[in-house]
Image: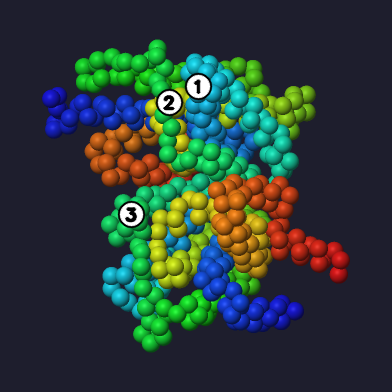
Amino acid sequence: MATFLGINLFALSGQLLIGLINGSFYALLALGLAIIFGLLKIINFSQGALYMLGAFGAYLGLNHLGLSYWWALLLVPLAIAAIGILMERTLIRPIANEDHLYSLLLTFGIALILQGLFTHWFGSSGLPYAIPEELKGGTKLPFMYLPNYRAWIIVFSLVVCAGTWYLIEKTKLGAYLRAGTENPQLMQAFGINVPLIVTLTYGFGVGLAGVAGVLAAPVYSVSPEMGSNILIVVFAIVVIGGMGSIGGAILTGLAMGVVEGLTKYFYPEASNTVIFLVMVLVILTRPAGLFGKPA
Amino acid sequence: MNKKLTIALLGVALVAPLAIYPVFLMKILCFALFACAFNLLLGFAGLLSFGHAVFLGTGGYITGHLMLNYSVTPEIGIIAGVICAGLIGFVYGKLAVRREGIYFAMITLALAQLAFFFYLQAPFTGGEDGLQGVPRGNLFGVIDLEDNMTMYYFVLAIFSAGFWLIHRCVHSPFGQILKAIRENEPRAISLGYKVEQYKLLAFVLSASLAGLAGSTKALVFQLASLTDVHWFMSGEVVLMTLLGGMGTIWGPVIGATTVVGMQNMLASGPLANYIHVVMGVVFVICVLAFRNGIVGELQKLVKKNF
């Protein structure tokens, strides 16, 4: 058995891998929250429910429509984005000028509805979703066995995160979005259709939750409660990272996944709570968050 | 007129258990106190805590634990529960008041989840089973609370005391400063008020009163469980306050009565499996069309027509 300073390297690298996978999901969800917050200044409480919806989309697609994993990975996020766009236009837009706490409560209500409906339809026990044929099996590495699908999750979510970062920081559309974050009135005066950008941003942000949902279906069991549990952790991550920067949200998400994985190895009792404890430390030392600008 | 209304309502509350099942009434009173405590923070200080269930649950667990294992009298059990809830409120409040608005809500929610996992694993809470068969004990060592009627008047007394305290707070200079902070925080700071301390004090008060509601609830149902610390309970108290009317004195009472009554009705009807869905729908309707809540809308109606 490979050990180093009394640490079992097999077990440790296994936990690190799980940490990185969880971190990938945290990063995708935190990124979606940060993008939506940047332009709309609201916290989307239904992000977790839409992530759950993404996983169920993959499950239902496979079992009722014969939709393969790969088609689901393409179509389900688009469907979730469409639902998001509908939500933004019909429910969130009318209260855009009210206190932002109302939109938090509104999206919380939507999350309750979605979670309640799926609990009623599918029960609260998890449903299985098979790993796609192409990604079965794994690779033997010096310290561990790396299942292909898990490697795929990390690679794919990193590509999505990096692509989103590039889109926002380096393209013209991204420039519009950043300008809208700074000063929407001025941008409107320049003749840019701000309401359209807001709608597309919201759709894109929740679409990321859909991507995370489809990715998660084969590794976590598909259950109605999968969204609410992860969302609260993602909230803590958003507080840790601060919502000022896109790259910050991605990095904090991944880092917190790794921290959680390490805790699972060294002190498993605290693995559920370690991210919240990190949040407490950050509030005490850097109230604006690691990447946030002090107010 | 308000005084007359209060006396009339107190009269109704005194005779109510003759007509309605007392345990149901006690449930309403406990949740009404919980919602009033929450409203002190949201309605008057403008702080949305999304983790208030922690204080309800803490009160319940501490009281339940003491009553079960040390057979203390109920008033000691309740006082201990309130103090513990207040202490946690102090720590959580100290952390949360460093951020505002949406961050405040997220921080309180995350801190509440931290407490949830703690209670899930801690040996004295009974984990998933919770604390069952909590004895109600003898009040001051003499009055037996096992009888539901006696218990009802005890709960009514606790609720009235808590409600009166909140009423006094809101109408004191302290309450006025809270409202000033809610309306215009920079101005309150420029006038020399230490805003964070006022917020913290409001948070501790609110947490302690929520703990009082939780301790009482644990005695009423002789049960303290994870349901009371779950995030869903935190959402429920937001709904009660929003539906009844935030920032009004009677709103949370009406809201709690409506929500508890609604859940009771739904539980036995065809919609039993849809309780969360119905609550979600009520949330959405309240936010979209009904932001003043029942009491707020009534007040508007009265103002317009009389």
- Choose between B124 and B98: the one closer to the eye: B124
Kindly indicate whether the residue at mark 2 contacts the one at mark 1 (C-beta within 8 angstroms).
Answer: yes
Do badges 1 and 2 share one subunit? yes
Q: Which residue is mark 3?
A: B127
Separation of disc 1 and disc 2 at Cα? 9 Å
Instruction: Report the amino acid beneath label 3.
Output: Gly
Foreground: disc 1 or disc 3: 1
Q: Secondary structure under badge 1?
A: helix
**Residue, far bottom:** B142
Q: Position of residue A45 (x, y in %)?
A: 56, 41
**Residue, far top:** A134
Label 1 environment density (alpha carbons within 10 Å; few <14, some 14–19, many ≥20): some
Q: Position of residue B43 (x, y in %)?
A: 62, 60
Kindly indicate whether the residue at mark 3 contacts the one at mark 1 (C-beta within 8 angstroms).
Answer: no
Q: Which residue is mark 2?
A: A129
Q: Position of residue B88 (x, y in %)?
A: 41, 60
Chain of the residue under label 2: A
Q: Secondary structure under badge 2?
A: loop
Q: Position of residue B34 (x, y in %)?
A: 53, 64
**Residue, far right:** B305
Chain of the residue under label 1: A
- Choose between A50 and B175: the one closer to the eye: A50
